[in-house]
Structure formats: C-alpha cells, structure tokens
Image (cartoon, rainbow, N blue to C red):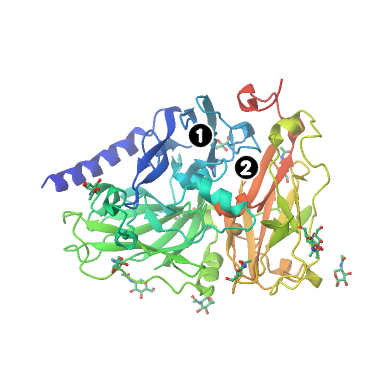
Amino acid sequence: MMLKLFTLLNLIFISLVNVQLVEAKIRRYKWEVKYEYKSPDCFRKLVITVNGRTPGPTILAKENDTIVVELKNSLLTENVAIYWHGIRQKGTPWFDGTEGVTQCPILPGETFIYRFVVDRPGTYLYHAHYGMQREAGLYGSIRVAPEKPEPFSYDYDRSIILNDWYHKSTHEQATGLSSIPFQWVEEPQSLLIQGKGKFNCSQLTAPSLNVSSFCDASKPECSPYVLTVVPGKTFRLRISSLTALSALSFQIEGHNMTVVEADGHYVEPFVVQNLFIYSGETYSVLIKADQDPSRNYWATTNVVNRPPKTPPGLAILNYYPNNPKRLPPTAPPPGPYWDDVQPRLNQSLAIKAHQNFTTPPPPISDRLILFLNTQNLVNGYRRWSVNNVSFNLPNIPYLISLKNDLTQAFDQTPPPNGFNLTSYDIYNIPENRNGTASSAIYRLSFNSTVDIVLQNAKYNENGSTSETHPWHLHGHDFWVLGYGEGKFDMYKDPRKYNLVNPIMKNTVPVHPYGWTALRFQADNPGAWAFHCHIESHFYMGMGVVFAEGIERLGKLPSSIMGCVGH
Ligand SMILES: *[C@@H]1O[C@H](CO)[C@@H](O)[C@H](O)[C@H]1NC(C)=O
Ligand SMILES: *[C@@H]1O[C@H](CO)[C@@H](O)[C@H](O)[C@H]1NC(C)=O
Ligand SMILES: *[C@@H]1O[C@H](CO)[C@@H](O)[C@H](O)[C@H]1NC(C)=O
Ligand SMILES: *[C@@H]1O[C@H](CO)[C@@H](O)[C@H](O)[C@H]1NC(C)=O
Ligand SMILES: *[C@@H]1O[C@H](CO)[C@@H](O)[C@H](O)[C@H]1NC(C)=O
Ligand SMILES: *[C@@H]1O[C@H](CO)[C@@H](O)[C@H](O)[C@H]1NC(C)=O
Ligand SMILES: *[C@@H]1O[C@H](CO)[C@@H](O)[C@H](O)[C@H]1NC(C)=O
Ligand SMILES: *[C@@H]1O[C@H](CO)[C@@H](O)[C@H](O)[C@H]1NC(C)=O
Ligand SMILES: *[C@@H]1O[C@H](CO)[C@@H](O)[C@H](O)[C@H]1NC(C)=O
Ligand SMILES: *[C@@H]1O[C@H](CO)[C@@H](O)[C@H](O)[C@H]1NC(C)=O
Ligand SMILES: *[C@@H]1O[C@H](CO)[C@@H](O)[C@H](O)[C@H]1NC(C)=O
Ligand SMILES: [Cu+2]
C-alpha cells in the first residue's frame, strides 16, 4: 500500500513540477561534485556524484531560460569541467565546459559558475569533459520545455539515461590506454538504466575474498529502475545514451515506441520495436500503456555492434497499481543480433525532420572536409586518428590562445582537409600503420557552410568489422545529409543527399564500413570540439577542433583562464 501511495504521489509531484516551469527565467543550481562509494550495479566503487547522486539532478527549464550552475569541485585531487551536451552556447562559447578547448580545468576546491541560455526546447544532457571522468558517473539530463505547442501529445514525461559501467577506475583505464604495450579497457561489466544495473556478484567468488563486503545484489541501490505507467495513458520517454563504449538497443516488452524527437528536433514520427541509440544521442519516444494491465513488463537494453560480453540491462515497466517490485512473468525479450548492421542503418535513414518543423539546409556548401577514421601507431602508442592524424589537447585552451594570438600554444600547420580514398582500401589495414599526433585545428570562415564526410574503415588486424563511431559536434547542430555503405564517392554520392527534410542532430553514427555526410553553418563564434563520443576513443585522439568568428568575440571571462599565466 505504501508503495502504491508513493508511486501515485510521485506522479502527482511530477505533474506539479511541469506546471511550475512556466514562470521563472533564471534557474540557479548549486552543485558539489565529489567522489563517493556507490554501488550502481551492486558492485561498490568510487564514483563521481553531483550533490550525492549519479546520475546527477535533472535540469528542468523552459525555452530561453538562463541556467546558472555554481559548481564546487570537491574531488580533492582532481580537476573537473562540465559540458552541456546539445546546448549551442550562442554568445557564451566560454561556458561550453570542454576542458582544453573552451576553458581551463576547475581545480580542486574551486567554485566555477556556468551561465548560459537554453535557447531551444528538447532533450539534452550534461557530463564531465575532463579526461575520462564522464564514465566515473558525472552525468545527467537537461529537459527544456517548449513555448510553442509540440506536434504530438502525451500525458507524462520521463527522462531515462542509458549507460554502460566499468568496475575499473577511469585512471586505471586511461593508464592502460596510454601504455606500451597497449591495454584495452575491454567490455563494460554492466549496462545501467537511469543509473541502475545488476552485476552477477557470484562471478567474483574466490576463497580469500569476502565478496558480500563489496558486491551485494540485495542492495536497494541496485534494484532495477522502475518506470510506472498508468493504464490507458501515453508516456513520453526521453531516452538518451551516455555509454563509454557500447552502442545499444532499447526495447519495452510488448510495446512499440513512436520516435518523435532526436537531439532536440522533432522527427516525422515512425514506429520501432527496438530503438538503436549511440553514445551522445537523445530521443523522445511515445509509448501507450495499452497492454494487459494486470502484470509488469521488461524494459531492456542490449549491446550491439561489438560481440556482447555485457549482460543486458533490465528495468521494469510497472502498470499502476501493480507492485512496482513484482518481476514480469516472462523472460526478458532478447535483443537484436549484435552484428546485423542493416536494421541500424535503416533506423538512421528513417529519421527525417518533422514536416511542420523542417529547416532545409543551404543547397550548396563552401567547403568539404573528409575524415577517414583509422587506428594508428604514433611512436608505438596505439591511437585513433582522422586522416592519419591523432588529436592532442594543448595545455592552453584553444579559445584563450586564439583570442590572444598565442601562436606557440598549438600546432599552426593546417591539418589535412581530406584523404585520398582512391588509393585507400577501407576493408584492410594498411601495411604501414604509423600516424602522427597534432594539436592543429580547422579554421572555418565565419558563417560559411561546411560539409563533413566521415568515412569508416577496418580498424585493426583483429577486428572482424569496422566499428560504429558516434560523432558529436559542440556549438552547432548539423543536417544529416546521408549515409552510405562502402567508400564515399565524392562525385556520385552528393547527388543522393537529402536536401529536403534532413534531420538536424548533434550526434550521428558512422556505421561499419560506411560513411555519413553532414552539413553545418559555421555561425557560432568560438572553438568547438568535434569528436567520437566513445570515451576511450576521444581519449585516444579521435577528434578535431573547429574555430570560427573568434574576432567577433568580446572579452573572455577571467574565470576560464585559471591555467594561463598572467
Ligand atoms: C528563444 O530565443 C531564440 C534565439 O534568440 C529565438 O529565436 C526564439 O524565438 C526564442 N523563443 C521564444 C519562445 O521566445
Ligand atoms: C502540420 O501543419 C498543418 C498545417 O498547419 C496542420 O494542419 C497539421 O495539423 C500539423 N501537423 C502536426 C502533426 O502538427
Ligand atoms: C551468476 O554467476 C554464477 C557463477 O558464474 C552462475 O552460476 C549463475 O548462473 C549466474 N547467474 C545469473 C543470473 O546469470
Ligand atoms: C563479509 O562482509 C559482510 C558485509 O560487509 C559482513 O557483514 C560479514 O561479516 C563479512 N564476513 C566475513 C566472514 O568477514
Ligand atoms: C508493433 O509493431 C509491429 C510491426 O508493425 C506489429 O506487428 C505489432 O503488432 C505491434 N505491437 C503492438 C503491441 O502494437
Ligand atoms: C531496411 O530497409 C529496406 C528498405 O526500406 C527494407 O527492404 C529492409 O527489409 C529493411 N531491413 C531491415 C532489417 O529492417
Ligand atoms: C613506424 O614508427 C616506428 C617508431 O615508432 C618506426 O620504428 C617504424 O620504422 C615506423 N614504420 C614505418 C613503416 O615507417
Ligand atoms: C589519389 O590516388 C590515386 C591512386 O593512387 C591517384 O591516381 C590520384 O592522382 C590521387 N589523387 C590525388 C588528388 O592525389
Ligand atoms: C601516415 O603518416 C605516417 C607518418 O607520417 C606515414 O608514414 C604514413 O605513410 C601515413 N599513412 C598514410 C596512409 O598516409
Ligand atoms: C549567415 O548567412 C546567412 C545566409 O547564408 C544569413 O542569412 C545570415 O544573416 C548570416 N549570419 C551572419 C551572422 O552573418
Ligand atoms: C590481436 O590479437 C593478438 C592475439 O590475441 C594480440 O596479441 C594483439 O595484441 C592483437 N592486436 C590488436 C591490435 O588488438
Ligand atoms: Cu569511436
């Protein structure tokens, strides 16, 4: 009875919160970031929390509100920076939160104030952007309510972040990735749904270990996430992924999902049983609670693209007023076959801008940049590269060195604008795998229209497939002009671009042995990272930086310059 009452109150409370959103214009948050022992998947380890929680608090705002986050770094011996994923930071490029690109790190004990406008409705995220801290647990949701009516309706609104989870610390992982011999992070131990998973503690038995002291499946903390629905009602689920590595599918037993939003843009609705989702993406789906209300159902997430060694993540879709803890009577539905690229490509192709919310791209672009994704050896270290160049962050953040003409701060040679694909075999790795590393950046003419084509290839001698890379752009949304299989043909393929109703996104997958074409307007003065959203890949150099319109920027706030000598 108590549980039922609690659930009902919870539903009422959420409705009240939604109503309250209408008035305030400045939303202030005081956050303290620190390490704490937590057991998100029953295994106890040090995680980074925001105000004691992981995922951190959800930011609820209305279109054009100003968000002010006063962030105290209580990590004791570690820097931090928080990135506002999907927020374009028009006029405030210094509050993007990307350490090394837009700001100096926030030192232990320091308080830093982020202040920015959420100028579009939609589903966004925040997460650490320093080292590999994101996967230590520093992440959460941003939900921006619209001023205008949306092209769909629903009764309740929920945010669910999917994640994968490692038991090793990020420091141990980073050390392995930057060692000779290279030590890969391997597959994650668990999948988390809204911060909750279940690792099988029995796998840890060893005579000398008291496993229950650090892995305890009976902890309420790692009970499955419960999504309570009211029969007959329609729920908007804002599903996002912040995985460190995994590409995921998400499904709800017995319920189809209608996709209505992607990365803050309304989608021409389409129905899926499995939603494929890559790290850095956000979607809204609608589900109707129209199944047998006398039982509960599974919500599951599975690894795709890599041979799954991680068990599925499980949550419970609870039909009110059933007991939310009652397990569904059926076995969780299996995920799609991990190595089947076709349905994933199909989903990518199915995502189009909603007919009433279409902003067509400029018909032609001013510049085409081709990025070939490869794994290289740089002085014997294994690195990810584009066009044979692996990215190194400089000591002084680009925004500061660009604004102050500190030409010594990073490599001034322009990086390669493309790669000769004619002579490159994407299905084999080259005999000479050596590459170089550089901190050079791409300077874009202000307000020019830029096309990017990302080309995938086989990545190492053991990989049977090439890997899906979700590329994420800071400071802009891009139009997704097309996806293709095989090698991009610079003369033929652009004729097939969708220039009519392409979706705009900030994160997009590049499928195995395929290419993805994007277009964006370089209209946001600042320095912006564009990188693979897989945590270890970006750490290994899979990214670039674009700079545009720096001369249009006013004085930079001194708060971002803590690492620069005066
Ligand atoms: C929010 O701000 C943007 C950019 O200034 C503007 O285009 C938009 O119309 C504003 N929205 C509302 C509801 O005022
Ligand atoms: C799209 O716009 C048309 C014309 O204004 C309107 O009739 C229709 O209801 C709209 N569709 C949706 C789904 O909002
Ligand atoms: C947990 O692991 C143990 C030991 O490997 C195994 O016997 C058991 O079947 C596993 N349980 C589940 C639910 O997978
Ligand atoms: C194992 O750890 C649990 C939980 O910390 C504790 O209650 C129990 O006494 C320990 N058992 C032994 C044999 O040390
Ligand atoms: C889900 O969609 C599939 C394919 O369109 C359809 O066969 C199935 O009946 C639908 N299931 C429900 C519960 O609506
Ligand atoms: C993918 O889409 C194509 C064309 O629409 C269709 O023929 C095919 O059956 C789809 N494949 C899958 C696996 O969904
Ligand atoms: C690749 O670089 C290594 C040094 O890291 C060097 O020993 C080797 O000769 C290079 N290979 C080729 C083919 O240039
Ligand atoms: C690309 O490589 C091909 C084959 O090696 C060569 O014929 C062509 O001239 C190269 N193109 C450019 C622009 O260098
Ligand atoms: C990549 O760069 C390395 C080092 O400069 C060079 O040896 C190699 O030939 C380049 N590879 C390709 C495919 O251009
Ligand atoms: C950028 O270019 C577009 C046309 O492509 C124009 O409408 C817009 O005013 C320009 N913006 C700025 C800030 O110059
Ligand atoms: C490929 O596999 C072999 C044998 O397992 C291993 O020694 C080697 O390091 C692997 N190479 C890469 C690039 O993963
Ligand atoms: Cu990647």
Residue 268, horizontal then vertical, whole percent: 49, 60
Residue 128, horizontal then vertical, whole percent: 52, 41
Determine whether 237 is above or below 553 in the image: below
Q: Residue at x 78, y 68 (%)?
A: 421
Neighbor class of circle 2 (other Cα within 10 Å; few <14, some 14-19, many 20+) is many
Determine whether 543 is above or below 102 in the image: below
Q: Earlier in the sequence, mark 1 or mark 2?
A: 1
User: Residue at label 2?
Assistant: 475
Ligand 1: does it lie within 8 Å of the C-beta at label 1? Answer: yes
Residue 64's disc number: 1
Marks 1 and 2: CB-CB under 8 Å?
Answer: no
On screen, residue 399 versus residue 60, left or right, reads right
Q: Quadrant of ligand 1?
A: top right
Ligand 10: does it lie within 8 Å of the C-beta at label 2? Answer: no
Amino acid bearing label 1? Asn
On screen, residue 549 versus residue 469, left or right, reads right
Residue 63, horizontal then vertical, whole percent: 48, 37
On screen, residue 103 versus residue 330, left or right, reads right
Determine whether 270 is above or below 170 in the image: below
Q: CA distance from mark 1 to mark 2?
A: 16 Å
